[in-house]
Image (tube, helix red, strand yellow):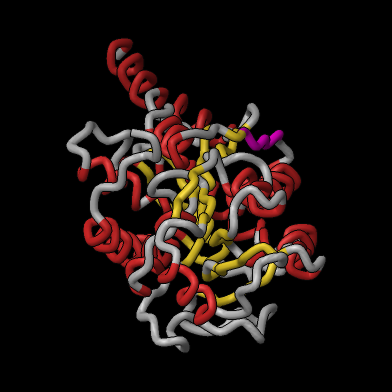
Amino acid sequence: MRRRLALALMLCCIPVAPVLAQEKFPDRPITIVAPFPPGGVADLTARPVAAAMEKILKNPVVVVNKTGAAGAVGMSFVANSKPDGYTLLMALSSISIIPEADKLFDRKPAYTVDQLVPLALFSADPTILAVGANHPWKNVRDLVADAKKRPGAISYSSSGIYGTLHMAMEMFSHAAGIKLNHVPYGGAGPALTAVLGGHQDMLASGPAVLIPHIKAGKLRALAGWGAKRVAAMPDVPTFKELGYDIEFYIWAGAFAPKGTPEAIMKKLRETMKQVVQEPEFKDAMAKLETPIAYMDAPDFQKFYERDGKMLAEATRRIGRIEEPGK
């Protein structure tokens, strides 16, 4: 009888520890890794998300910028982190490009796409082509004509080789049949600063990053990579309207490492659903003039797979691109 009682007590106690551990989540700070420097889309999205999460969870949520290799450093860091819900990633569409680029160079991938699991999509803005306001190009036609006269003379900055901003410009230059001079930087923030400072001629970036400088008269928008015009920029045509069959979006979404317990994933997904309803988050995105395009994990997974397939094909089509100077 004593043995049976002891066995019964043991069986009853087995599930208690994991359940209690899951019920306590979170009981320490959560880190959201933005794999690009401050000032870019990932950083500008991660900060209001973190602030809203902290309010909802009543637990510290911090944003850490882990930069380098067009975002691969930060993405790899999260992909290889402990899957416990305390290290998350705010990724851009380049998350699908980097592993494909690694294949082109026959190198060990920094991470694979299946190492990261979608949690929530927050925004999906088409990329915008902007030039310094001091340049004479008033439209894409002017730019292309000049580029054909001076191959390689017109420069553009980007967040890094095979990064989001680089891919958009490569799609454009291929479609237009022109050669531009690519100058990579460590993120969208530095790339923008280079154009504003007159060191480079133009860049592709998200509307949220560009609009303040367009309004200030420092940049001029020539075209967008979306299927339709951006609501905040109704006078800027799409490349498709101009006869170029190219489309590219800078989306921002949260990911967790593969293997994160289902109970914790559920908690994080519920939290993200509440984040997009928070007035402070809505205000922050409105100030960036970025429409919220929320998707929960199942729909985001489908979107991610569809977008990833398109970007992988584009990366293979563009082929190997060596870093300048190599």
x, y (%) of residue 60? 71, 34
Residue 168 seen by the camera:
no
| Nearest to the observer: residue 287 or residue 150 | 150
Residue under the image location 73 percent in, 46 percent down: 51
| Nearest to the observer: residue 134 or residue 192 | 134
x, y (%) of residue 138? 63, 79
| Nearest to the observer: residue 198 or residue 296 | 198
Quarter of the picture holding the N terminus: top left
Q: Is residue 11 left or right of residue 224?
A: left
Q: Is residue 153 above or below residue 141?
A: above
Residue under the image location 37 percent in, 39 percent down: 323
Residue 198 seen by the camera:
yes
x, y (%) of residue 46? 63, 48
Q: Is residue 70 left or right of residue 123?
A: left
Residue under the image location 33 percent in, 67 percent down: 174
Residue under the image location 82 percent in, 66 percent down: 216
| Nearest to the observer: residue 17 or residue 5 | 17
| Residue 270 belongs to the span the image colors magenta | no
Q: Which of the 4 image quadrants contains residue 279?
A: bottom right
Q: Is residue 150 left or right of residue 219?
A: left
| Residue 63 belongs to the span the image colors magenta | yes
Residue found farthest to the top: 2
> Magenta region: which residues?
60-64
Secondary structure predominantly adopted by residues drawn in magenta: strand
x, y (%) of residue 186? 54, 38
